[in-house]
Amino acid sequence: MKIAVTADLHLTSLQDHAERYHALENILDQMLMEAIHTMIIAGDLFDVHIRNYAEFDALCQKPKYRDIQFHIIPGNHDSQIDSRMFTSDNVKIHSKSGIHSFDLISVPFLFLPYQKDKTMGEEIATWRSELPPNEWILIGHGDWMESIQESNPLEPGVYMVLTRSDVESFKPAQVVLGHVHKPLDKDQVHYTGSPCGLDISETGKRRFLIIDSEDGSVMSKTVDTDIIFFDESFIMLPVEDEKIFIKKQVQSRMKEWNIKESDRNKIRMRVKVNGYSADKNGLMMTLKECFEGLSFYQDQEPDLSGVSISDDVDRAEITRRVLEKIRALKWPENEEEPSKEQMMLEALHVIYGD
């Protein structure tokens, strides 16, 4: 049996954020194409300010979605929801932690809704005797301690922690969590990520997960969203041909986006450039040329406030070589260490003396 899992839609109203409902509908349509009729939503289906769930209720009652069973666990944004707030008989709210089996041959699922001042380990411990090692799946909403550096910048603090020790002690076959909006797959722990970017900090294509409840495997599927955010930064040097220099950077970055031509109209991007240039006006014109036909986030033009004027080609060559060395470094990517880009900017300040 295959089961779809998503989280962190933060639904408000169709009038305010129709794109979030459209992302959910795209997931449901993909489920039907693969004959999947069970969806788990791992918290924060609704935004914190929403108290009327009629539009989601109506979506679940659409004839083509009536055979889909929605299993929803509350998150920290919608911890107050319960089954009394919905009229659809295919919606079940799991307000308390508990074990759920979808059929006779599927592994059991432990649902852990968000609870203030609780840890996931404390809740799992109460069910330990009913969870055969490596033969159960955890669905929860909170912070995996090894991913704290990826926490949602809009929600400082730590929520319902799951630790490496918990995973090693209780031995789930897979762990799928909501709360952190950036997708993550590390060993058997997965964050689905938000299926629709909520703002410019949630970049790139979005996804949902499919769990095979018989063998515990997890696979990722792309969500076709109305908007795709990108937040890009570049480093500029006063080289002999600045136009070619920045164009190569932009073309390389856009290639990494892996966006189909038909999806270019969905892009909303923010662009910032740091470094040094002999011609800031020419740099701006080149950037606009590179991004012609694409839309900037909130109509903001590229931010060149971090670009200083310099025509020192010798220092530019020194900088180029230093940056090559930094890019080649094997460097850990976490909150405790500076990023390679931060290192590059510091090198620029040293070389140019400001």
Image (cartoon, rainbow, N blue to C red):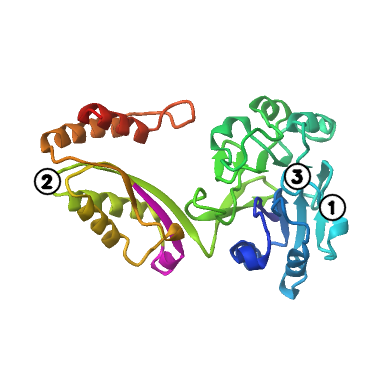
Q: Which residues are magenta?
A: 260-272
- Residue 341 x/y as whole percent: 35, 36
Does dot 1 land on a helix, a strand or a loop? loop
The residue type indicated by label 2 comes to Glu
The span from disc 3 to disc 1 (Cα, nearest Å) is: 25 Å
- Looking at marks 3 and 1 on the same chain, the residue that comes earlier in the sequence is marked by 1
Q: Quadrant of the C terminus?
A: top left
Q: Quadrant of residue 128?
A: top right
Residue 35 percent location from the top left of the image:
67, 65
Residue drawn where x is 22% and y is 28% of the image = 353
Front in this rendered view, residue 288 or 108: 288
Q: Which residue is mark 1?
A: 82
Residue 10 drawn above or below residue 162? below
Name the residue that disc number 3 marks: 107
- The residue furthest right is 84
Q: Is residue 269 magenta?
A: yes
- Taking the magenta stretch, the answer to whether it contains residue 100 is no
State whether residue 321 is above or below residue 195.
Answer: above
Identify the secondary structure beneath mark 2: loop
Which quadrant, please, contains the N terminus? Answer: bottom right
Q: Amino acid at mark 3?
A: Val
Query: Position of 255 compared to 147: left or right?
Result: left
Going by the image, does 209 lie left or right of 354? right
Rounded to the nearest whole Å, what is the CA distance between mark 3 and mark 2?
63 Å
Few, some or many residues within 10 Å of mark 2 (<14, 14–19, 20+): some
SS for dot 3: loop
Graded by Cα atoms within 10 Å as few (under 14), some (14 to 19) or many (20 or more), the crowding at tag 1 reads: some
Disc 2 designates what residue?
240
Which residue is rendered at x = 66% and y = 67% of the image? 14
